[in-house]
């Protein structure tokens, strides 16, 4: 089993964004769990913010969710965060554990 992969998904680690600002995953998670129509989600770190993939009920207001995430990241100290939100029917789970990687860090050199 590739434990290095599993350890990089540990949400206890801060998410470090491009300008060096550390954003703890709870900043993002708190917005997503308060959004009633989001059933599950995955957050991928990008160079200047995040890309959120959400499995959601049909009533999800993607634009409003995006604005709430931008505000949360800006309040946490990230200047001009770039946030993309898209929906999907399902999310890819780890093939061995079946767990969903909620937060995927930016790989070095990306």
Image (cartoon, rainbow, N blue to C red):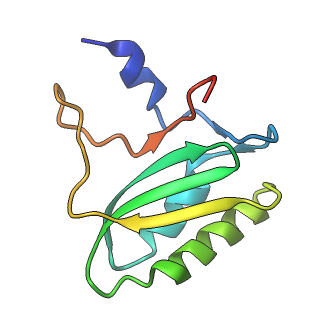
Position of 35 with respect to 45 (left or right) is left
| The quarter of the displayed image where residue 100 is located | top left
In the image, taking residue 104 as reference, residue 72 lies left or right, namely right
Q: Position of residue 89 (x, y in %)?
A: 21, 64
Relative placement, left or right, of 110 versus 56 is: right
Residue at 60% across / 68% down in the picture? Answer: 69
For residue 92, above or below residue 57: above
The image quarter containing residue 27 is bottom right
Task: In the displayed orientation, state which residue is furthest to the bottom.
Answer: 59
42 horizontally vs 82: left or right: left
Quarter-wise, where is residue 45 in the image? top right
Residue 109 rendering spot, x and y as whole percentages: 63, 23
For image coordinates 60% across by 30% down, the residue present is 110
Image point (71%, 42%), residue name: 17
The extreme front residue here reads 110
The correct choice, above or below, for 50 with respect to 64 in the image is above
Q: Quadrant of the N terminus?
A: top left
* Image x and y of residue 24, in percent: 63, 46
């Amino acid at each position: 089993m590739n434990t290095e992969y599993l350890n990089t998904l540990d949400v206890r680690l801060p998410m470090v964004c491009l300008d060096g600002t550390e954003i703890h995953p709870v900043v993002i998670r708190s917005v997503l769990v308060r959004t009633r129509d989001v059933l599950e989600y995955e957050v991928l770190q990008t160079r200047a913010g995040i890309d959120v993939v959400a499995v959601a009920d049909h009533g999800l207001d993607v634009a409003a969710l995006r604005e709430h995430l931008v505000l949360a990241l800006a309040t946490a100290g990230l200047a001009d965060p770039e946030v993309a939100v898209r929906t999907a029917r399902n999310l890819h789970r780890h093939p061995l554990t079946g767990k969903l990687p909620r937060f995927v860090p930016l790989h070095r050199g990306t």
